[in-house]
Image (cartoon, helix red, strand yellow):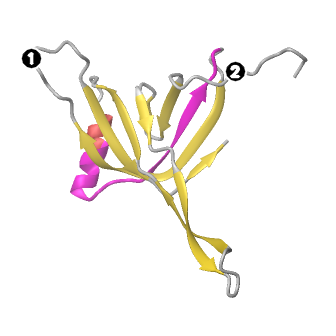
Amino acid sequence: MPVGEKKYPFTAFRFRIEINGIISAYFSDVSGLQIETETEAIEEGGVNDYVHYFPKRTKYQHLILKRGLTDSDELWKWYQDVVSGRFKRKNGSIILIDSAGNDKWRWNFVQAYPVKWSGPDLKAESSSIAFETIEIVHHGISKE
């Protein structure tokens, strides 16, 4: 990087979602991009002020995707397949885009399926957008 050139952080509002078999590029909110490794504490014998920490199981949080309700019912159908027991796991990606419109970071999730669907809050006196939310479980995240 040349002297004086600044690297600015990427903005959180420029992203898209891809799920194989479902075109899902228009989500307004994504949460749950989180990985946590549990640890086990072992106290060292004879040294009372020192504790060793060893990694145990790694857990992946559920991804929660929120978007304005549209004419597309692909997410609803995917969840209804889970409800009926004839669902298919899907792989997907969350892609962060820079200010020039280029893909910068990609988090890939594998073997995902929905475990919760929430419809919009419908209020006659409101002029807000109707949102649907889908929560999906997966078997891991990798970053490109």
Q: Give the Cα distance between marks 1 and 2.
A: 42 Å
Q: Which residues are magenta?
A: 78-99
**Camera sees residue 139:** yes
Residue 95: mark in rendering:
none
| Residue projecting furthest to the left | 124
Q: Secondary structure at mark 2?
A: loop
Question: What residue is drawn where x is 23% and y is 54%?
Answer: 83
Measured from the top left, where is residue 97 in percent x and y? 60, 24
Q: Which residue is mark 2?
A: 8
Q: Is residue 102 left or right of residue 30?
A: right
Asked whether 86 falls inside the magenta stretch, the response is yes
Question: What residue is drawn where x is 30% and y is 27%?
Answer: 72
Question: What residue is drawn where x is 57% and y is 22%?
Answer: 11
Q: Secondary structure at mark 1?
A: loop
Q: Front-most of 84 and 124?
A: 124
Quick one: label 1, few (<14), some, or many (20+) residues within 10 Å? Answer: few
Residue 124: mark in rendering:
1
| Residue projecting furthest to the bottom | 46
